[in-house]
Image (cartoon, helix red, strand yellow):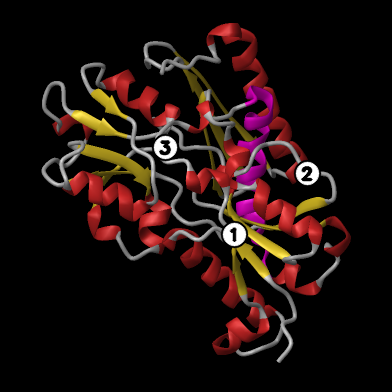
Amino acid sequence: MTPLLKIGTRGSRLATTQCGWVQRQIVTALGHDPALSHEVAPLVIITTQGDRIQDRRLIEAGGKQLFTKEIEDALLSGEVDVAVHSLKDMPAEDIPGLSLCAFPVREDPRDAFVSLKYRSLEDLPQGAKLGTASLRRQAQALAVRPDLEVVMLRGNVDTRLSKLEAGHCDAMLLAAAGLKRMGLEAHIKSYIDPDLFPCAPGQGALAIQCRTNDLDQEWIKRLHHVETHLQISAERGALVALEASCRTAVGAYAKIEGDALTLFVEALTADGRTRWQRRETIIAPTLETAHALGLGLGQSIRDEAGDRLIQYTG
């Protein structure tokens, strides 16, 4: 059969696993048997510049857009009709002609502590090596364990786990969502409490992107999860205000309890010695008020932190 649409994705096992889940949701929403997913809505693997760069932090190469540009170019050119991204990899700025059209239900937003020998950050011996390529995770870890040696660790999940097993580091911090989606939850020794150390804005959420002219499609509404959208609207409001990128250590975590949304925003210096935090609750949130909350808390931190916020220590 002729495909109804083509879905663009990165080629890592995590990306194709996540995208495969979304693919089946889309095919079901289109009224077809998910067993026919590859005929109805085939995946198109697109290698991004961020996938090719494994030897340095993204800040040194150009930032978050390195994971999205080639896929977005394919959307704009018509090579694919839909793209699936990890929301935390998405820059805050919109791309003209493209829109984030749906956010499926969010996975676990927490960071996971992974180690062969140790149960938590607190259990690590003095001077242990902690693997991460995230400036936020580095700063949050050093805030409580300034003795740790942070080792730059790039690569997909399988590569990072292999490096841990090879002894490149004593422990690492990874997104719990990715490990759970890949069936690797057994590697998680403990979780980082996001009420103490907020995750990356949008972590655990997937974003479906399409051409703006294609927004008015019924299947999009069927995939969309309202509570997830409220949470990430608040978190990405903080992202916009703080201009958070790969050179800023920024976390934002929104949770909904009853009719209340609470947002916790944090920014840190790269060494973790200084932390700026804001927390506020609003009742009966809308997308507009949730986003405004994020903007307000982020701007408050920005006003206080000033130039100290944007730091990078290579």
Range drawn in magenta: 223-243
- Tell me which residue sits at (50%, 37%) in the image: 200
Q: Position of residue 268 (x, y in %)?
A: 46, 18
Q: First in sequence: mark 3 or mark 1?
A: 1
Is the residue marked by circle 1 packed among few (<14), some (14-19), or many (20+) residues within 10 Å? some
| Nearer mark to the viewer, of 3 and 2 | 2
What residue is disc 1 on?
A: 46
| Nearer mark to the viewer, of 1 and 2 | 1
Main SS, magenta region, reads helix
In contact (CB < 8 Å): disc 1 and disc 2: no
Residue 313's place in the image compared with 109, above or below, is: above
Front residue of 60/125: it is 60
How far apart in space, not on screen, are marks 1 and 2 (Cα)?
18 Å
- Tell me which residue sits at (53%, 56%) in the image: 106
How far apart in space, not on screen, are marks 3 and 2 (Cα)?
30 Å
What residue is disc 2 on?
A: 95
What residue is disc 3 on?
A: 194
Residue reaching furthest to the right: 213
> Quadrant of the image for the N terminus?
bottom right
Q: Position of residue 298 (x, y in %)?
A: 63, 23
SS for dot 1: loop
Q: First in sequence: mark 1 or mark 2?
A: 1
SS for dot 2: loop
Q: Amino acid at mark 2?
A: Ile
